[in-house]
Image (cartoon, helix red, strand yellow):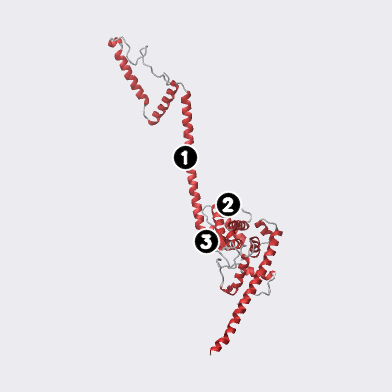
Amino acid sequence: MAEMPFHDRVQLLTDQLGLPGVDVLGGLFDLTAQRLVRLAVAITRNQYDGEDAVQAVMTRIAVRPVPLREAQAPWAYLLRMVRNEALLIARKKKRWITTTHSITDLVTRRRVDELEQEDTHRAVWTALRSLPAAQAEVVVLKTWEGMTFAEIAEVLQESPNTVASRYQYGLQKLADRLKKAASEAMGERALRNVAPKKAAPNRGGHR
Amino acid sequence: MSYLRPDNFDAASVEAMLQAAGGYVGPSDDLRPRVLEEARRLRSGGQRRWRLTLAGGSALAAVVLLSAQASTLSQSLSEATPSQRVAVLVESSHATSKSTGEGLWALVDAFFKVRSEQAEAFRPDSAGADAPSVGESSEGVAQMPTADGSF
């Protein structure tokens, strides 16, 4: 049996929001939190701020569920809510946000079979966090949410052409930064490989 | 080990790398309980606020109604002549005595009975005195309220 599409599962839950005796907030959180936090972190460039944005949106839904329940496309509406909240937080804390080359504040998860790819994942997230928020959010929605430019344009309330060009610029910057990171990593590996060879004659000299 | 290699960074491979890193970052373990607790707190706070607003509204409505009634009564009393004022008060006392089951009129009857006995006692043909007694009018009859309460 084919799995129900993600946005239909979201709609199934949001249809029950606010009904007496039904508490779907936990289920909605379980279904959407990972994606929402991912988007919010890409915009705020910070795990805590991203989580704050998601928390603020979820509690707002708990208090006033009707707008989300009555939305034509609840998943797009939820993404827009989190995006707006994340931008608000990012704007408030603008002076403290700096481009970081570390992702130590992020809560990362990796499957055992992905251990080998962790370097790549770290490089991707470091590069993504260095992008301007306007480009990062488009990259997240296009790549991870699988949305079309028209759908993204609806969420961001921009024209599809603007969204498409932001995606192209963002992808180009990511490619440049990943290339640079790969060169640096390769240089470090070369140094690590050379160092033991240089040390070998010294050890021999002590004999 | 799989390392980043600087040889292939076209759009497709960057997209593939992005795709693979999608699940790498997620929410912390304490976010879920934090969200649910905050939601519960806000919802119960909202209900409490609603109950307080309702109680406050009811109290305000009661005060407004009472003051409107008091103002109407006060206005009607101030515009009335003294006899009408007494009539209104007697009427409201009568209503009160009816509702409480006590007879104000019984008291009035008793008063009139005493006054009649006094009048009888001081009547000239019975007591031999010429002067009218205290409390009697020039006609020799105590003023009594009529049926509608006026004198």
Instruction: Residue A167: tell me if it is visible.
Output: yes
* Residue at mark 3 to residue at mark 1: CA–CA distance: 41 Å
Could you tell me which residue is drawn at 49 percent across and 49 percent down?
Answer: B47
Do the residues at pointers 1 and 2 share their chain? Answer: no
What kind of element bears circle 2? helix
Query: Is B124 left or right of B3, judged from the image as shown?
Result: left
What kind of element bears circle 1? helix
Pick whichever of labels 3 and 1 is earlier in the sequence. 3
In the image, B127 versus B100, the foreground residue is B127
Which chain hosts label 1?
A: B
| Quadrant of the snapshot with the N terminus of chain B | bottom right
Image quadrant of residue A91? Answer: bottom right
Query: Is A201 left or right of B70, judged from the image as shown?
Result: right
Q: Position of residue A4 (x, y in %)?
A: 61, 63
Query: Is B20 left or right of B106, judged from the image as shown?
Result: right
Cβ–Cβ under 8 Å for marks 3 and 1: no
Could you tell me which residue is drawn at 63 percent across and 74 percent down?
Answer: A184
List the single residue furthest toward the left: B127
Q: Is residue B102 above or below residue B14?
A: above
Residue identified by numbered label 2? A66
Image quadrant of residue B13? Answer: bottom right
In the image, A203 versus B18, the foreground residue is A203
Q: Residues within 10 Å of mark 2 (few under 14, many from 20)?
A: some
Residue identified by numbered label 1? B59
Which chain hosts label 2?
A: A
In the image, B96 versus A99, the foreground residue is A99
Cβ–Cβ under 8 Å for marks 1 and 2: no
* Residue at mark 2 to residue at mark 3: CA–CA distance: 22 Å
Q: Is residue B26 above or below residue A62?
A: below
- Which disc number belongs to residue B32? 3
What kind of element bears circle 3? helix
